[in-house]
Amino acid sequence: MYGPADWFPDEHPATVPPIVAVGRRDAAINACGLCHYLGGAGRQENAGLAGLPYEYFVQTMQDFRNDKRRSADPRKANTNRMILFAKAMTDEEITASARYYSSIPWKQRIRVVEARMVPKTRMQFGVFFRLPGNEMEPLGMRILEGPEDAERFELRDPHSLFVAYVPVGSVKTGETLVKTGGDGRTVQCGICHGPTLEGSGPVPGIAGRDPSYVVRQLYDMQVGTRHGTWSALMKPVVDKLTAEDLVAIGAYVASLKPSGS
């Protein structure tokens, strides 16, 4: 927890802030690189930090610190830990980590597959792991995202890839919602997130991001567990969206390949 493996040191800036590389034991702050990786790729149960705008990153940490950003599910342990980390971090540690991760281009690491039947899985620590054997089950109206290689994933190999099974037709439905607003159900995402959805100024990119992460954030804003500056702007955007809409939007944006990939 205070010195995670650096698998590919040539793939991130040579100078890594101490809070990212080793954390701070005296305040029980784990290294950022433990969960989000030193290259910022992140994992299904948390967030990819690479390429997030500096201003957005700092605002997010301030929102955690000031109790303005929580999960809609109070059992989501890593969100609760992030709140504790943010409260214990200094302003210098927050800005140093923001400068570091914002300088790394975001790369898509997920494969989106439309399906009706999917492998049976089990949930452990917020991650869906495929069960041994070839048993299948109906997907229904959900996103089933998990590591392609469970062993490499657990070893925190940042080259370990993910697959996201999504409902048949959801990518096209999501594209319509994202590009047109769906006849007033929402707003065209490109207005704020940029024409390629790779971000614009302090607004983060969403193209190629894990659908689990995207849907969690949209839902948290919809039900009111996020209260920061950006959340207030997003609240009217997500208010009318159904659960099916959220799944479709997550499926579509995850399928997009950012220019840095």
Image (cartoon, rainbow, N blue to C red):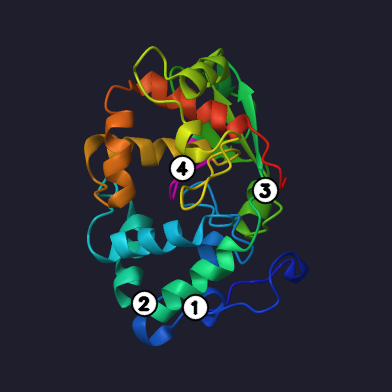
If you read the primary sequence from the N terminus, does the residue marked by circle 3 or circle 1 appear first?
Answer: 1
**Residue found at x 43% / y 56%:** 56
Amino acid type shown at disc 2 = Met
Q: Closer to the camera, 223 or 52?
A: 52
Q: Position of residue 204 (x, y in %)?
A: 49, 48
Q: Find disc 3 in the rendering and name its residue.
A: 107
Residue 126 among magenta residues: yes
Mark-to-mark CA distance, 4 and 3: 15 Å
If you read the primary sequence from the N terminus, does the residue marked by circle 2 or circle 1 appear first?
Answer: 1
Residue 92 among magenta residues: no
Mark-to-mark CA distance, 2 and 3: 27 Å
Q: Closer to the camera, 37 or 131?
A: 37
Q: Position of residue 165 (x, y in %)?
A: 57, 26
Mark-to-mark CA distance, 2 and 1: 9 Å
Q: Residue 227 vs residue 196: left or right?
A: left
**Residue found at x 33% / y 20%:** 242
Q: Find disc 2 in the rendering and name its residue.
A: 89
Q: Residues within 10 Å of mark 3 (few under 14, many from 20)?
A: some
Q: Residue furthest right?
A: 10
Most common secondary structure along the magenta stretch: strand
Q: Which residues are magenta?
A: 122-128
